[in-house]
């Protein structure tokens, strides 16, 4: 192997190295494919010394232009003015993070719109040698085609809600704060002076009231111009850059080493912490912050050299690679985040631990790894199959990703994402996160806790200052306003109105039990003792059960079970009615909606081939079959065909609603009831089948969310696929390996009085549910003689309720009533228990303040700081 310096000028001559990287558009997977630089241009010190008088700038959204991009661009003789040299009044992208749709006075020399190449050229190509390769191009899918549909499944769901807040159109959006918007002429000039207090640079508004009440119709998809240089959604424009450099390196050795190290370390730490009580979690947001200085450090200390692989080595012979090909950039950081986010779902690992420590039946370690990895990869395959619905359309927003993309862009922007006067996003994040961290160490005040405490106090406050309690459901700064008030309305309806009536009427014999709670009770109103009805070999003693007591649930808990039966059916029917036609067109290969700027930019990279996805699906299903075959005495092999039915049927409705509203549709009742009916008296089979079903759904949702994040950050799809598949497989091995190691080293692990708090309390819910659903069985709880025999009718009720709403929506599409999203209303209260009223009331109040009041009255502040505030509070 030979090596040579990174440039003609030795790296020791200056403080910053020269960088040039090979295009990732054609070699997104080749981590070795980096060409040695041909000149010393692109040095950061050269970039910072650019003449302030040079106003030649050749990109939009420079507030989100990463450092590595600027250096790479200048290395190709494309001068770019540093942000400090550009007058802020001429760059409205600095004044709110939203690119202008019109040219402002004095900006004629700054091309704020994308240049369009000839129609025959793909995005990212150049028609002439003089055209800069880093210009954003927008020529794609602008021509109508036979069978073209303007409706995507998620966009049609947004339209059906009746809210104009999530849509933006050049000509149809209602004005901001009641201010009439100036009509644009063909040249893009507004023709009037803009008031900076009324969101300068925004030709759209941020209305968040129903279209019918706002006096304007919701923007129609066909009215959105597919040549716009940014998203039609204000939230996306404020958080996601509309610029891409296809030559920015992504699959670097540095990114893989840092990413896989953090992924495996995180998986091991979380596996150990999951066994303790309390069971904290090393969150992906923390890992993202750790990765940033590590990447910067690697770019600073690694040698600026290129090595040539010997020609005699097959496939990779003759390739050149570098440990430090360019400054650490936002795409590498995104890839690292995607790797670390894979470790969040642990259903199968927890079920394996319950089988060993609670039932005394250890599962083969190889079987555990195979089953867990197969379930995750099947979720990945489902996310890939529905990628055209969940990832590519611009209407598939995924609000959770806006928080991550805002933080990533703020960390990697040239000036710390300073937009306009005042504090930068990066500094704002540091102050809020640090203050939140310090707040947790404030000394307790007994009187304050007694009066305002939400656990042991009187809860005399509509607002809770504990962010972990406020964001118990999810951060209220992320949930769209229309979804937030509907979820809270569902909570008020079912738990503040219906539950008290049922309780005081003693429905389901709940009057002698606590009104709130998540435990099961016997007929003496004492906690249910399973030891009275369970034999030593974990079988049900039917005689003892009949003599002792059936299970009684608090009224709030039984209401949660009823909603648990209703919500999945309502979500499935709602999706078929509202998004069914669009999904059918997608299955036929027709285009669902006009591609936004992000989809057009991603055309520079080759897509993942669908046959790869189907191969992963078949292999993962074969892995589930093989793992069941290892323990066929407990789990019949044929049950694998049953366990994948629920994920296959419900994955798309669950993912669409999650992507649109952040609301989760729980399938626990279904994935527990079906095995309980098929395998009565077999709690381990019920336990494992439930875990596999939930793992597929959860992992698939995480994979789809991360693919949308990579779509926003312009990471090549094939690089994302490889990172997700490898990280998922290796994290499973580490998690289960650490868990098994602890069980081998600590003989008394998972016992109540374990000296090091390795009590495995987090497994208690899975153990209890396996006894209730697998041992006692759903027939005794919900059968014709059961106390809760009405609950299964919730499936029928949930399936019927969307139909009259859909018919009403077709007749009066802009009425207030047709704006209801039934699955969101029904799923909102399902955090109870363990969530309580103070969690929901404080969650709604904070959401109302920021998502309604601040957004309408201070839109510039909201666009700049809302999502970074959410990230800071979560991190602190």
Image (cartoon, grey):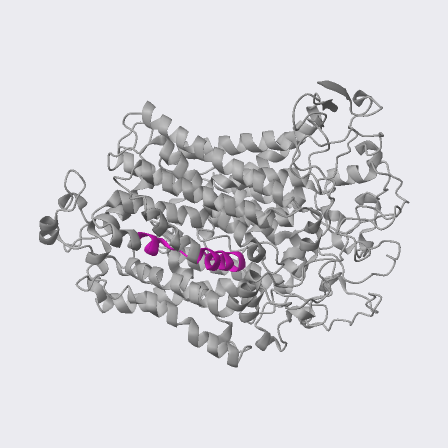
Q: Residue at x 26, y 52 (%)?
A: 678
Q: Residue furthest bottom?
A: 811
Q: Is residue 753 above or below residue 209?
A: above
Residue, x 74% and y 44% (percent of image)? Answer: 245
Q: Is residue 589 left or right of residue 469?
A: right
Relative to 824, residue 82 above or below? above
Chief secondary structure of the magenta span? Answer: helix
- The residue depicted at 63 percent of the width and 68 percent of the height is 147
| Residue at 84 percent of width and 46 percent of height | 132
Q: Is residue 809 above or below residue 847?
A: below
Q: Nearer the viewer, residue 758 or 365?
A: 365
- Whole-percent x and y of residue 394? 63, 58
Q: Quadrant of the N terminus?
A: top right
**Residue 593 in view (yes/no):** yes
Residue 771 rendering spot, x and y as whole percentages: 23, 47
* Residue closer to the observer: 869 or 827: 827
Say which of 80 and 464 sits in front.
80
Please state the horizontal and vertical placement of residue 91, each as a whole percent of the image.
Answer: 79, 53
Q: Is residue 662 magenta?
A: yes
Left or right: where 208 falls relative to 749: right
Residue 113 magenta-highlighted: no
Q: Which residues are magenta?
A: 650-672
The answer to whether residue 176 is left or right of residue 491 is right
Most foreground residue, 586 or 564: 586
Indicate the position of residue 409 as horizontal and vertical percent values. Answer: 67, 45
> In this orientation, does residue 346 appear?
no
């Amino acid at each position: 192997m030979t090596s040579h310096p990174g440039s003609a000028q030795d790296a020791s001559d200056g403080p910053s190295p020269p960088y040039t990287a090979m295009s990732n558009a054609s070699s997104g997977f080749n981590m070795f494919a980096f060409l040695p630089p041909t000149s010393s241009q692109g040095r950061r010190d050269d970039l910072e010394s650019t003449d302030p008088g040079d106003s030649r700038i050749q990109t939009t959204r420079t507030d989100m232009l990463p450092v590595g991009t600027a250096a790479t661009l200048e290395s190709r003789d494309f001068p770019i003015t540093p942000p400090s040299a550009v007058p802020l009044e001429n760059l409205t992208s600095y004044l709110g993070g939203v690119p202008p749709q019109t040219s402002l006075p004095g900006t004629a020399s700054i091309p704020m719109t994308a240049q369009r190449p000839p129609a025959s050229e793909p995005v990212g190509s150049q028609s002439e040698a003089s055209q800069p390769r880093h210009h954003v191009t927008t020529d794609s899918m602008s021509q109508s085609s036979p069978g073209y549909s303007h409706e995507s499944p998620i966009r049609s769901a947004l339209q059906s809600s009746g809210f104009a807040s999530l849509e933006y159109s050049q000509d149809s959006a209602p004005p901001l704060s009641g201010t009439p918007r100036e009509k644009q002429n063909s040249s893009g000039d507004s023709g009037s002076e803009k008031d900076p207090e009324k969101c300068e640079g925004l030709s759209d508004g941020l209305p968040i009231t129903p279209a019918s009440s706002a006096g304007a119709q919701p923007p129609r998809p066909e009215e959105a111009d597919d040549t716009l240089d940014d998203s039609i959604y204000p939230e996306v424009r404020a958080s996601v850059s509309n610029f891409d450099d296809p030559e920015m390196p992504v699959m670097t050795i540095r990114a893989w080493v840092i990413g896989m190290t953090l992924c495996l370390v995180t998986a091991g730490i979380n596996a150990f912490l999951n066994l303790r009580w309390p069971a904290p979690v090393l969150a992906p947001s923390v890992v993202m912050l750790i990765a940033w200085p590590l990447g910067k450090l690697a770019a600073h200390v690694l040698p600026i050299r290129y090595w040539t692989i010997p020609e005699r080595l097959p496939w990779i012979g003759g390739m050149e690679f570098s440990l430090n090909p360019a400054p650490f950039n936002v795409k590498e950081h995104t890839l690292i985040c995607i790797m670390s986010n894979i470790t969040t779902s642990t259903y199968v690992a927890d079920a394996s631990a319950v089988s060993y420590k609670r039932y005394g039946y250890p599962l083969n370690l190889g079987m555990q790894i195979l089953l867990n990895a197969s379930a995750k990869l099947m979720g990945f395959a489902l996310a890939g199959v529905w990628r055209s619905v969940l990832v590519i359309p611009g209407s598939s927003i995924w609000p959770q990703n806006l928080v991550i993309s805002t933080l990533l862009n703020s960390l990697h922007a040239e000036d710390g994402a300073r937009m306009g006067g005042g504090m930068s996003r990066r500094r704002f994040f540091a102050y809020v996160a640090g203050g939140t961290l310090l707040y947790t160490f404030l000394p307790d005040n007994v009187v304050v806790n007694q009066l305002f405490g939400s656990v042991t106090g009187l809860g005399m406050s509509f607002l809770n200052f504990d962010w972990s309690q406020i964001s118990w459901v999810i951060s209220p700064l992320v949930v769209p306003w229309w979804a937030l008030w509907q979820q809270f309305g569902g909570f008020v309806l079912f738990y503040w109105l219906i539950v008290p009536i049922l309780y005081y009427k003693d429905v389901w014999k709940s009057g002698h039990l606590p009104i709130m709670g998540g435990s099961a009770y016997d007929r003496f109103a004492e906690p249910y003792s399973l030891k009275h009805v369970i034999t030593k070999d974990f079988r049900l003693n039917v005689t003892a059960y009949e003599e002792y007591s059936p299970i009684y649930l608090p009224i709030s808990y039984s209401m949660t079970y009823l909603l648990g039966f209703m919500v999945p059916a309502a979500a499935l029917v709602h999706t078929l009615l509202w998004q069914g036609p669009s999904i059918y067109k997608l299955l036929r290969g027709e285009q669902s909606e006009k591609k936004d700027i992000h989809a057009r930019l991603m055309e520079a990279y080759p897509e993942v081939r669908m046959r790869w996805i189907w191969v992963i699906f078949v292999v993962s299903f074969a892995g589930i079959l093989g793992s069941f075959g290892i323990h066929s005495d407990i789990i019949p092999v044929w049950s694998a065909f049953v366990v994948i039915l629920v994920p296959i049927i419900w994955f798309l409705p669950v993912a669409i609603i999650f992507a649109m509203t952040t609301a989760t549709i729980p399938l626990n009742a279904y994935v527990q009831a079906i095995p309980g009916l098929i395998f009565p008296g077999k709690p381990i089979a019920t336990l494992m089948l439930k875990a596999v079903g939930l793992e597929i759904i959860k992992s698939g949702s995480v994979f789809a969310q991360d693919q949308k994040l990579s779509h926003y950050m312009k990471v090549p799809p094939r690089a994302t696929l490889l990172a997700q598949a490898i990280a998922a497989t290796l994290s499973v091995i580490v998690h289960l390996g650490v868990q098994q190691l602890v069980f081998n080293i600590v003989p008394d692990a998972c016992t109540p009085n374990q000296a090091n708090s390795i009590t495995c309390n987090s497994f208690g819910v899975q153990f209890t549910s396996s006894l209730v659903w697998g041992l006692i069985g759903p027939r005794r709880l919900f059968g014709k003689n059961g106390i809760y025999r009405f609950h299964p009718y919730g499936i029928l009720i949930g399936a019927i309720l969307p139909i009259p709403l859909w018919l009403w929506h077709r007749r009066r599409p802009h009425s207030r009533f047709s704006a209801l999203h039934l699955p969101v209303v029904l799923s909102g209260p399902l955090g109870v228990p363990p969530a309580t009223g103070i969690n929901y009331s404080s969650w709604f109040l904070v959401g109302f303040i920021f998502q309604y009041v601040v957004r309408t009255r201070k839109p510039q502040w909201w666009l700049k700081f809302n999502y970074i505030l959410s990230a800071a509070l979560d991190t602190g």
